[in-house]
Image (tube, grey):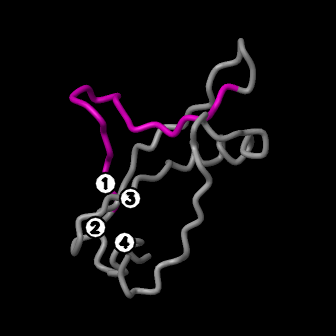
Amino acid sequence: MRCWICGSDRLSPVGELTSGERWNERLQLRFRRPGILKPRPTFGAGLARACRDCGALFPFLDEYARQELDAVADDLTDVEGAQARHYRGSDGSGP
């Protein structure tokens, strides 16, 4: 795995990612509600790696959350106001 920002292959081991002082607070990936009375699809990103060269942080889902996301992904829509952006893969030459 390489850093998506600077292309370095010097990434940290996987670490626990929290978003607050409480043990159960995690970053979350949230999508638009599928209906008025339906809950927003939300997936916790509790793991991350960091680039040891540029400091970029790469959060990701654990296996259970990834499987949940995969099961409903075809029915998800962008959050309101989000614009589609297309990123090309890092070729190691920088941003």
Task: Find disc 1 in the rendering and name its residue.
Answer: 15
Q: Earlier in the sequence, mark 1 or mark 4?
A: 4
Which secondary structure, mark 3? strand
Residue drawn at (40%, 86%), measured in percent from left and top? Answer: 92
The disc label shown at residue 12, or none: 2
Q: CA distance from mark 2 to mark 4?
A: 15 Å
Q: Nearer the viewer, mark 3 or mark 4?
A: 4
Inspect the magenta stretch and tell me whether residue 27 lies in it. Answer: yes
Which secondary structure, mark 1? strand
Q: Nearer the viewer, mark 2 or mark 4?
A: 4
Q: Earlier in the sequence, mark 3 or mark 1?
A: 1
Q: Nearer the viewer, mark 1 or mark 4?
A: 4
Choose between 1 and 95: the one closer to the eye. 95
The disc label shown at residue 58, or none: 3
The spot of residue 53 in percent (x, y) is 22, 75
Choose between 88 and 49: the one closer to the eye. 88
Q: Earlier in the sequence, mark 2 or mark 3?
A: 2
Q: Which residues are magenta?
A: 14-33
Q: Look at label 4 and name its amino acid.
A: Ile
Q: Earlier in the sequence, mark 2 or mark 4?
A: 4
Which secondary structure, mark 4? loop
The disc label shown at residue 5, or none: 4
Choose between 31 and 10: the one closer to the eye. 31
Q: Earlier in the sequence, mark 3 or mark 4?
A: 4
Our reading of the magenta stretch's main secondary structure is: loop
| Category of crowding for the residue at label 2, using alpha-carbon neighbours closer than 10 angstroms: few (below 14), some (14–19), many (at least 20) | few
